[in-house]
Structure formats: C-alpha cells, structure tokens
Amino acid sequence: MTAQLIDGNALSRQLRADVSARVTALKTQGITPGLAVILVGENPASQVYVRNKVKACEDTGMHSVLERWPATMTEAELLARVEALNADATIHGILVQLPLPAHIDAQKVIEAISPAKDVDGFHIASAGALMTGMPGFWPCTPYGCMKMLESIGYDLKGKHAVVIGRSNIVGKPMALMLLQKNATVTICHSATKDLKAMTLQADVIVAAVGKRNVLTADMVKPGAVVIDVGMNRNDEGKLCGDVDFEGVKEVAGYITPVPGGVGPMTITMLMVNTLESAERMK
C-alpha cells in the first residue's frame, strides 16, 4: 500500500483563490487588507521566507509593506516601529520575521504587537485564546496542518493523535487544535522514553522537531495519517522533512511531502489570518 499524498501546493491554490475573492469584496467597501513584514538582519533563509510572504500578498490582491533593517537595529528602535504599525489603520497584520539578532528580546517584540494584528498567532493573548477556545489568530503552521486534515475529510473525533515536538510555534498549538476537534492527543519530545511505542498507537502523527528521519516506517501504524512539518537538508543538500518519506509512504494511509506539503500552507494561512483581521476591523 502506498500512501495518498496530501498536496499542500494544490490546497494552497484553492484557499488563496477564496482569499482573493474575499479581498476583492473588501476592496469594494474601500478596505485593502494590509500586511507589514519587518526583517532585521541578513539571514538568508529569512530573506526567502519574507520574499514569499510579500509575493503571496501581491498574488491575492493585498497590500504589503516590507521593512528591512540592519542587524545593528536596537530593540528600542524595533519596538518603536511595531508601535507605529499598531497605530497604522492601513495595516491589519504585523509580522516580525524570526530569528532576531541576539541583542533583541524576541518575546518582548512579539508581545508589543497588538493582539488584533498578531497574524502569526504568537502573542500570549493568541495563545490564551487558543487554549480556552476563544476567537483569535491561530499560528499559521499548525493551522495549515488542520486544513490539510480537513481537506481529506478526516474526522479526528476519538482518534489518537501524536505530536512529535513541543515548540510554542508548532507543537503546543498543534496539540490544542487537535484537542479542539476531540482527538486524544499525546505530545512527545526529546525526553520521551519510547517514541516508537507512542507513534505505533497513533492514527495521526505530526512530526515537528527539525530532525531528519525522526519518524521511520517501523514506527507507523498501517493506514495512519502522517503530517511532516520538518524542514531539513539531506546529505545531497536537498530539502527534506522529519519523516523518512520513502519508507513511511509504504505504510501510511496519507502523507505530506517535503517540499510541497506544509510549507506553502503556512504562508497561505498567514494570508487567511491577515484577511480575517481586515474583516474584523471593518
């Protein structure tokens, strides 16, 4: 049995078409959703991510502002820029690209963003809203994973979901989103004693630790759904995930590829969050 692919590129195109239609409708009311992206320093990966986010805005008809600042920018200067964007009525979403230079407290910067414009879903108010089931912005990567599960018509009620990873950006919010859909959720991490024993029980596995081959075929129950959030490089320098794709696809029922899986969905959900921010503010 070979797993069915959950194609993140195809799903992204569908969702972005819906975003574009809603953006067009908002524009007839005189509102253009706006996203501000702040990039501090010259991190090559960050430059690629930022370029893709700005292009996605343009493709869906949104307004984008890209601010590039040198790595020497002070924390006070960055906080002042965030405050100015909080007050800018043409901006509905603010994203400060991480990582930041070591002399800047990233958490302090995230908390300075207005929760109403926290389209990354990293603010403590957004985390609290997710925790308590209140309206708020969901972090884009796990939100994209949920959309992928939804796209295959997967009913999570009563299913056992195992999340490998406990970061604030993916692992923890992923577990909460799965819980909201009535899954039984296990979070595994570097201190988990027997990861294989956990994953073999799982109907759904989300691998999000940034480590190649953390999940192999012998760790997967036949027919399980496997979502690969990892972004790594193999020995040939090619992009790969956390999952041994070639092995696991022969056991799983569904699997996401890398590239072309969760990656494009992350940026798409950023567009969705920015659009919904604009719709809330109108």
Image (cartoon, rainbow, N blue to C red):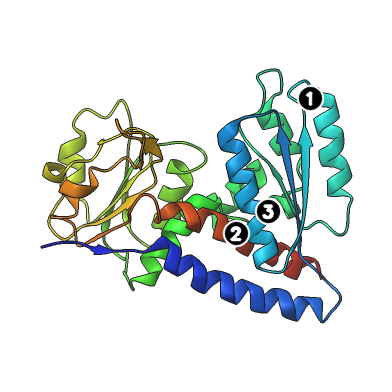
The numbered mark, 3 or 1, whose residue comes first in the sequence reads 3
Asked where in the image residue 210 lies, by quadrant, the reply is top left
Residue drawn at (73%, 23%) of the image:
71
The numbered mark, 2 or 3, whose residue comes first in the sequence reads 3
Q: Which mark is residue 54?
A: 3
Residue drawn at (11%, 43%) of the image:
218
Residue where numbered disc 2 is placed: 134
**Is 114 drawn above or below residue 46 in the view shown?**
below
Name which residue type carries label 2: Met
Q: Quadrant of the N terminus?
A: bottom left
Residue at the far front in the pictured view: 236
Name which residue type carries label 1: Glu
Report, in whole angstroms, how far the alpha carbon at label 2 lies from the one at label 1. Answer: 31 Å
Name which residue type carries label 3: Val
Name the secondary structure under disc 2.
loop
Residues marked 2 and 3 touching at CB (< 8 Å): no
Q: Position of residue 6 (x, y in %)?
A: 33, 63
Q: Where is residue 128 in the image (x, y as percent from the top left)?
A: 60, 47
Report, in whole angstroms, how far the alpha carbon at label 3 lies from the one at label 1. Answer: 24 Å
Mark 3 packing: few (<14 Cα in 10 Å), some, or many (20+)? many
Name the secondary structure under disc 1.
helix
Q: Is residue 225 left or right of residue 282?
A: left
Q: Where is residue 230 in the image (x, y as percent from the top left)?
A: 38, 41
Residue drawn at (54%, 53%) of the image:
140
Residue drawn at (47%, 44%) of the image:
170
Mark 2 packing: few (<14 Cα in 10 Å), some, or many (20+)? few
Q: Which mark is residue 75?
A: 1
Q: Quadrant of the C terminus?
A: bottom right
